[in-house]
Structure formats: C-alpha cells, structure tokens
Image (spheres, rainbow, N blue to C red):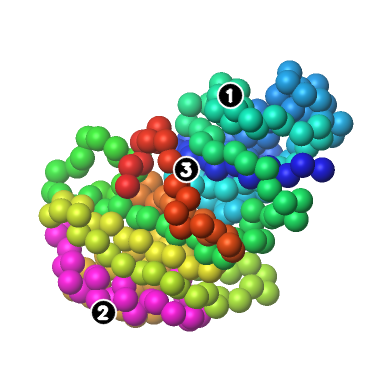
Amino acid sequence: MPNYKLALEYNGSDFHGSQAQPNKRTVQGELETCLNSLYGPEGSIVQNPELIFTTFSSRTDTGVHALEQIINFKLEPSINLRNDFKVLAAINNNLPEDIVAVKIKEVADSFHARHDATAREYLYKIFIRRHRPVLRLDSLMWQKEPLDFERMAKHATTLVGEQDFSRFAKLEAEDSGLCEVLKSELIQESKLCFKYKIKANRFLRHMVRRIVGELIQVGQGQEASAETCNLSVPASGLCLIDVEYPNCHPEEPKATSGSLSVPL
C-alpha cells in the first residue's frame, strides 16, 4: 500500500497537543479529519477502503509549535504527485488556519515517521524586557529580569552527550532517562532575545522546558541543583524545528513556508 511522508507546520496555541485525544482539539485529529474527507472511504478525491490514520515523528504538548513535524500515512489507491502543489493545496484548503502542509512525497512502505527518526531538534525563545511584549506572544517566553548570557551558555554545553535526563522529566512506566544530546547551545540574537537550541536522539516528556527552566535560574545567578531542574517554562516559547532520518541529503532544501507565526 502506498506510504506518504508529509511535513507539517502548526501553531500549537489552540491545540491540546499533537496526539489525538477524545473530545479535544489536536493536530492529529484535525489532520486525520482532513485526510479522510479527501481520501477516506467517502473521500471527495479518491476512496480508500478504510479510515486513514497518521503516525507523527514526535509528540508535542499543549501549546507547543512545529516548523517541521513529519507524519506518514498509507492509503490505496495512490495519490498522483506529479503536481504536488495541487495535492498540498487540496489538503491545506481542508485544514484549519493554524496547520499547514508544506511538503509531501511517496516513501518506502517500511518508512515509519517516529521509529525511523534518528534525531529531533527544538528551539526555545526567551524575550527579556521589563515591559511585556505585544507581538508574537504565542511564540516566546517573556522574562522580566535580565539574565547572564555567559553563565547560561556555559551551562548549556554541559548537557551535550549521553546522559540520564530523568531529573528533567516525567517518566513513563519502565522508561529510561538516557538520552544522547547532540546539540545544546544558547544564542544571543539581541539584548532582548535569547534562543536555545537542543537536538537529541530522543526526548523525555517536559525535558526541554525543564532544561530551559534551569538555564534561566542559572542566568539569575543560581547554581544547578536538584531543585533547579523542576521549573517548567511556558509551552509558548517551544517549537519543533527539525526531524532527521537516515540517508538524508543535506543539499535537499528544507520544507518551510513562512506561514507559521513562529519564525526562527
């Protein structure tokens, strides 16, 4: 059965996360409603004999955004992708305004968006000013007091490598806290804006938001301790920006559209 890889952007502000949940608005729920209206058993374009279900590369929590969320889904008969822009246009015309599909391709039947991913990268944005910002409130964290960038940047580098990050997370039953962090860097875009990027082979629930919480406390002069890893910062500043797979070609352009209100 044909298998399709779809790249999504979404503003997570009005979603109860990415994963489908009963009686709650989620990214997966909206996407599957859209795909079934087009390609499901009573689809307006083609009729798949069974309901279409999607697999997401990464689970994002309530309020978290994505500039590159990868999903895959299967259906029969196949979609004609000679003009993929028309296919994307049909999907986007049936999606709400806070989700957009930016790229689609047919992939091997064995491709699995979550299991095949080798790394995921997140971005967290911190806006530092005594007065609250009035623009892009849904895509950043507002920090009133100044932060020591050098202390924060130095502490960020200590998180690189394979470590037990269970102190930063709510572990599922029998889950391991072991993660390999490939990138952990703080960027000072301006006096008002710090950006934290972290890439790892896997992430634990709330891990990134608690790491940023610790970085902020370090930036306020505290030393990292068993207490500093318990502060979880708001979801509004967090965005999934990249998902990596084996045999990816670096020269291949990324699928970005600028339609999401969470620019890098």
Report if the CB atoms under discs 3 and 2 are less than 8 Å apart. no
Q: Residue at x 32, y 76 (%)?
A: 157
In this rendering, is residue 154 above or below 104? below
Q: Residues within 10 Å of mark 2 (few under 14, many from 20)?
A: some
The one nearer the camera, 251 or 88, is 251
The earlier-in-sequence mark between 3 and 2 is 2
The one nearer the camera, 155 or 184, is 184
Residue on which the image places disc 2: 223
Using the image, tell me which numbered label, if any, was put on residue 255. Answer: 3
x and y percent of residue 130 in the render?
Answer: 13, 49
The earlier-in-sequence mark between 2 and 1 is 1
The earlier-in-sequence mark between 1 and 3 is 1
Specify the amino acid type for callout 3: Ala
Disc 3 versus disc 2: distance between alpha carbons? Answer: 40 Å
In this rendering, is residue 64 above or below 24? below
Mark nearer the viewer, 3 or 2: 3
At numbered mark 1, what does the secondary structure look like: helix, strand or loop? helix
